[in-house]
Amino acid sequence: MTRTFGNDFLWGTATSAYQIEGAHDRDGRQDSVWDAFCRRPGAVFEGHTGDRACDHYGRMSEDIGILSWLGVNAYRFSISWSRVLPDGTGAINEAGLDFYDRLVDGLIEAGIDPMVTLFHWDYPLSLYHRGGWLNRDSAQWFADYVRVIVDRLSDRVTRWSTINEPQCFIGLGHQEGKHAPGLKLAPEDHLRAAHHALLAHGRAVQTIRAHAKVPSVVGWAPIGHISYPATEDPADIEAARRATFEMRNKDHWNNTWYSDPVCHGHYPEDGLALWGDAAPRVESGDMEIISQPLDFYGVNIYAGEPVRASEEHGWEVVSFPPGAPRTAFDWPIAPKSLEWGVRLLWERYGLPVIVTENGMANLDWPDEQGRVSDPQRIDYSSRYLAGLQRAMDAGADVRGYFHWSLLDNFEWAEGFRMRFGLVHVDFETMVRTPKASAHWYRDFIAAQRSGPTAKVGVRGAVTPGARKAI
Ligand code: FCB
């Protein structure tokens, strides 16, 4: 691959607190909804929990060492709200906050820029008992928590991502009941919870802007259905655009229900028509809060589907050929989803894009010599990054790429059976073994750094790019 990403491009890996930290009851941490959900019989594969996870809490220095060996210049991690504020609001747990303080110091010392995700699904259980996301006060509670983090870390942390994938924690957690807190709410209720999560996002952005000690780069990390054109025919490209941004059905896997309010200041018309009376009550001033200007659009993209133009509905899905490659999660391997997802999101929302997650689950284990070979992950990453490069060649302003994940970890309802790491973790001994893909990623990043600099700036505050047609 030729080198066009540039010296300032963020090359990182991503993780989240509940998935790696463990130490669920150490040093004053209290439960989140995920701790409670894991204890529910049948909720998580084979009753796995994040109680120990990867014991990142006890092995933070070792993990920073691995990041340093990888040569990444950035690392995206999340903060456990109930480790810092055990009751969700009020008294600060200094020991919990110290953990993140040391993590940030360790990263910076290793030359790795921290990107903090403020909420990656582990909502404090005590606040859940006060109504959780259904309570409009959630936005205030979140802002207060963010203030604590910003006061402590913003002298060193400049990159912030507010909420991770509202589509999942609302859709899977409050509509489908497959993730914590395991609710199957009526539409007016899960939509209200979603509205409050959007308000929380906006309040977090305001809090960072008002209180950060140095200029900050602020974004978020949604996910959504990505459709890409089956061919480069303009009619298929238009079909992909429509399929990606239409409110297709009454689930939360769309892009616009969340991103239009955040980036354009209103819910999409087709979504309002689809949900009808169940749509949330938008109070005056809500949309101003929700649509705070952002510096980047973080996006998590794993898969997508090809579509083509169709006379009947404007677009139709093109089936993958029989036997087409799929990951252990059964997600199709579709490098064009990264290429076109990034292009289409850049075109619609006009914000520099950071790929905040991309990666694959694979059936990895150490061989008799203790090596973990995962050629599928190398091939996946190589193809997806080529797709990302094509998106940049086509004009999309992309500032970084975070591989999901650094370590094999607790994959939510799937427990430990879905391994997403560049680094294998033995969950009994906690031994970490870099897989072949980790070596590959390390070499890839090193190669990206060893040529002339391309024109992609990321350091310091960035201003939203001009909206550009693809
Ligand atoms: C994303 C989540 C992340 C991880 C990956 C595989 O939806 O943000 O925590 O589970 O999927």
Image (cartoon, rainbow, N blue to C red):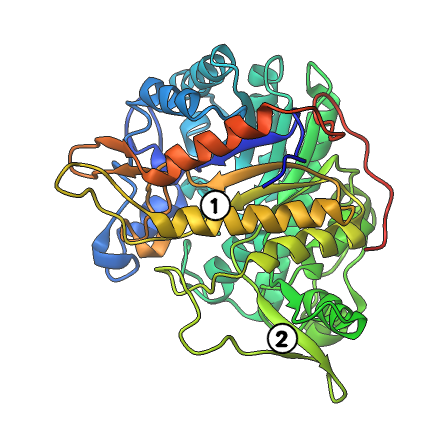
Where is the N terminus found, in terms of image quarters?
Answer: top right
The residue at the point 74 percent across, 66 percent down is: 241
- Give the camera-side residue of 157 and 358: 358
Where is the C terminus found, in terms of image quarters?
Answer: bottom right
How far across and down, in percent of the image, does residue 121 sit? 47, 45
User: Total of numbered circles in the picture?
Assistant: 2
Can you tell which quarter of the image residue 367 is in? top left
In the picture as drawn, the residue positioned furthest to the bottom comes out as 312
Cβ(mark 2) to ligand 1 < 8 Å? no
Residue type at mark 1 is Trp
Q: Are marks 1 and 2 in contact (CB under 8 Å)?
A: no
Q: Residues within 10 Å of mark 2 (few under 14, many from 20)?
A: few
Can you tell which quarter of the image residue 233 is in? bottom right
The residue at the point 28 percent across, 39 percent down is: 424
Residue matched to label 2: 249
Can residue 87 be seen at all in this image of the molecule?
no
Cβ(mark 1) to ligand 1 < 8 Å? yes
**Above or below — where is 470 with respect to 248?**
above
At numbered mark 2, what does the secondary structure look like: helix, strand or loop? loop
The residue at the point 64 percent across, 66 percent down is: 227
- Give the camera-side residue of 460 and 20: 460
